[in-house]
Structures are given as C-alpha cells and as structure tokens.
Image (tube, rainbow, N blue to C red):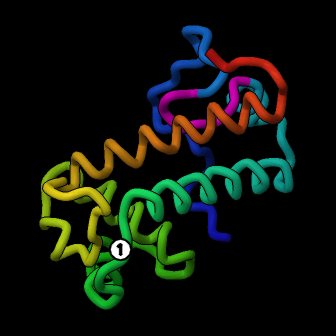
C-alpha cells in the first residue's frame, strides 16, 4: 500500500474540540496525538485502516464505470496508479469536487442518481466518518460521541 503523504492530517482537526475520531483525517484522537512517536509499522497500520475505510465507502456509494477514463484522469492529475483502483477513484474525486469534470468524465458512477462530484465526495467523506466512529466504538467498547 502506498502512503501518499507523511501524515494523514488535512488541517481540519476536531480532536482539539474533544472528538475521539477526527472529522478531518478520520484518525482516532490518540493516533493524532501520538502520530510523531509511532514507528513506521504503526503508522502504516493506521494508513491501511484509513485506505480500507476510503475504499469501502467509495464502493458503497459509487462504482468505477470506466476504468480507462478514471486512469486517464489520474494520470492527468499526477495521481499514483500504484494503488487500489478505489483509492485512485477517491483521490480523483477529491480533486474534482472543487470543480472539474463531471462524474461520467471521471469514469465514476454514483449509486444514487443526480449527484455531482462535490456531492458524491461529501457523501463518501460522511460515510468514512460513520465507519470510523463505528470502528472506534467496536475497538474500544465506548461511544465515540
């Protein structure tokens, strides 16, 4: 699994306000606090969970309708193609959400109708957060909210 950045942080941390799961990067609060003291294996484990959450949420809410189009968009955007196709789709969609090609041009088809890239990306982010909360609650046997 390829790590895209040094840290999953996206600069929108809600753990400083008491959230046990960050609404930005979706890491658990203790992972945010201890990230710089984690060794490479611990960091990779967190990355893999985050990648799995992204891939699962994307697959739940959308499908890859045209792999060739998706890979062309990824190449155009300079996105590494050495990762799972769902993660490529997530990154292409993330960048297109700010204004870009429509979903058909991206090779992505939403499972719900009439969504644009920004709406689909928001729905996927919300699904990732819900899944991360559930994972936290399952792992630590306490409510995350």
Identify the residue at image location x=21%, y=56%.
117
Q: Which residue is mark 1?
A: 78
Splitting the image into 4 quarters, where does residue 62 fall? Answer: bottom left
45 in the magenta segment: no
Identify the residue at image location x=64%, y=36%.
27
Identify the residue at image location x=19%, y=58%.
113
Foreground: 99 or 3? 99
Quadrant position of the C terminus in the picture: top right
- In this view, 134 is above or below 41: above
Q: Which region is colored magenta?
A: 22-29
x, y percentage for residue 90?
Answer: 41, 61
Splitting the image into 4 quarters, where does residue 112 fall? Answer: bottom left
Q: Residues within 10 Å of mark 1 (few under 14, many from 20)?
A: few
Foreground: 121 or 71? 121
Foreground: 11 or 64? 64
Foreground: 69 or 76? 69
Q: Main secondary structure of the magenta part?
A: loop
- In this view, 131 is above or below 56: above
Identify the residue at image location x=63%, y=69%.
2
């Amino acid at each position: 699994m390829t790590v895209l950045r040094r840290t999953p942080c996206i600069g929108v941390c809600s753990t400083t306000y008491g959230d046990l799961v960050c609404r930005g990067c979706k890491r658990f609060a203790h992972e945010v606090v201890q990230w710089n003291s984690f060794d490479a294996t611990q960091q990779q484990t967190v990355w893999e969970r985050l990648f799995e959450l992204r891939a699962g949420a994307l697959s739940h809410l959308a499908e890859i309708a045209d792999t060739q189009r998706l890979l062309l968009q990824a190449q155009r955007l300079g996105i590494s193609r050495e990762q799972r196709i769902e993660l490529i789709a997530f990154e292409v969609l993330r960048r297109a959400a700010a204004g870009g090609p429509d979903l058909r041009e991206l090779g992505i088809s939403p499972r719900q109708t009439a969504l644009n890239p920004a709406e689909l990306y928001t729905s996927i982010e919300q699904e990732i957060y819900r899944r991360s909360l559930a994972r936290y609650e399952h792992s630590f046997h306490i409510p995350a909210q």
